[in-house]
Image (cartoon, grey):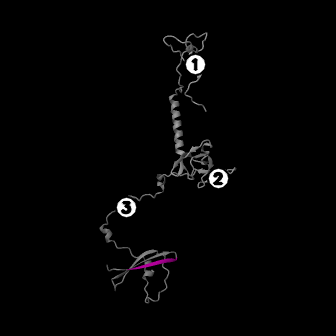
Amino acid sequence: MGNVNANPSQQDEQAFSTTVPVNGDLTDNAMLTHSPPTSPRATHSPLIFTPQVPVVPLQRPDEMHSWTQTTSSYEDMYTQHAIPILITWSYGGKDISVEGSWDNWKSRTRLQRSGKDFTILKVLPSGVYQYRFVVDGRCSYAPDLPWAQDEAGNSYNILDLQDYVPEDIGSISGFEPPQSPTSSYDNSQLSSEDYAKEPPLVPPHFATTLLNLRTTNMKIQPPMPRPQHGVLNHLFMQKEKSSNSVVALGTTHRYLAKYVTVVLYKSLQR
């Protein structure tokens, strides 16, 4: 690694130093100390050139367009396939770092304290990664996350981003049922022809239901015959002629050979 030092070297000082006249005269010490070495071919002071900054050669318009397009496509591809993941450490410590196989274990990144936890946000492409925490200089792992051990017995956590599904509400719009057509709900008003129609006849199956069976002796319950197949779910209403104070409402639900009948007696008096 190269070091950048702001202090010039001694040779540079000697090469680029000039003598300063004092009262029109040059002292001997100044000449011996700051003057460049004498040369038989050079009788004048060395020329000082302004250092040139390296400049990238200009590219053609077609090369510039292709380079820009390639760079933008690479950035778009990385951004499109990158997955943000939040790594959290919740087991104490003062200095927490994380290292993993996403860069072949080359670097360590320090986690930021968030309350009692330490977190860091990583943006990684899809794949399976191994990583471990460095807690106060010692390697560790989070037991509440997926983890494994290598042949040497060192434990590390596993980060699987292959089955990652982003939380995009718009992506589940295809699973919603289609809306009903407006033509089926035109909210049209009933005409006189609709009121002139007779109501539909009661199916003959309802005439033999349990609610329509009469018994002479209420103490002895008659055997309940199996209702016909047509009796699945219907509402029965019975109103006695002798008494107008009570109305009976009944419903029967049948599933295969089993059925449930519920009768509700309601008073007409308010």
What span is in magenta?
A: 257-265
**Residue farthest toward the right in the current orientation of the protein:** 151
- N-terminal-most mark, 2 or 1: 1
Q: Nearer the viewer, mark 1 or mark 3?
A: 1
Seen at 47% across and 77% down, the residue is 260
Q: Which mark is residue 185?
A: 3
Residue 85 seen in render: no
Helix, strand or loop for disc 1: helix
Count residues near mark 3 (Cα–Cα under 10 Å), then give few for <14, some for 14-19, many for 20+.
few
Amino acid carrying label 3: it is: Tyr
> How much space separates mark 1 and mark 3, taking CA atoms?
98 Å
On whether residue 196 falls in the magenta region, the answer is no
For residue 265, what is the image quadrant? bottom left
Above or below, 61 relative to 211? above
Seen at 52% across and 28% down, the residue is 60
The quarter of the picture where the N terminus appears is top right
> How much space separates mark 2 and mark 1, taking CA atoms?
63 Å
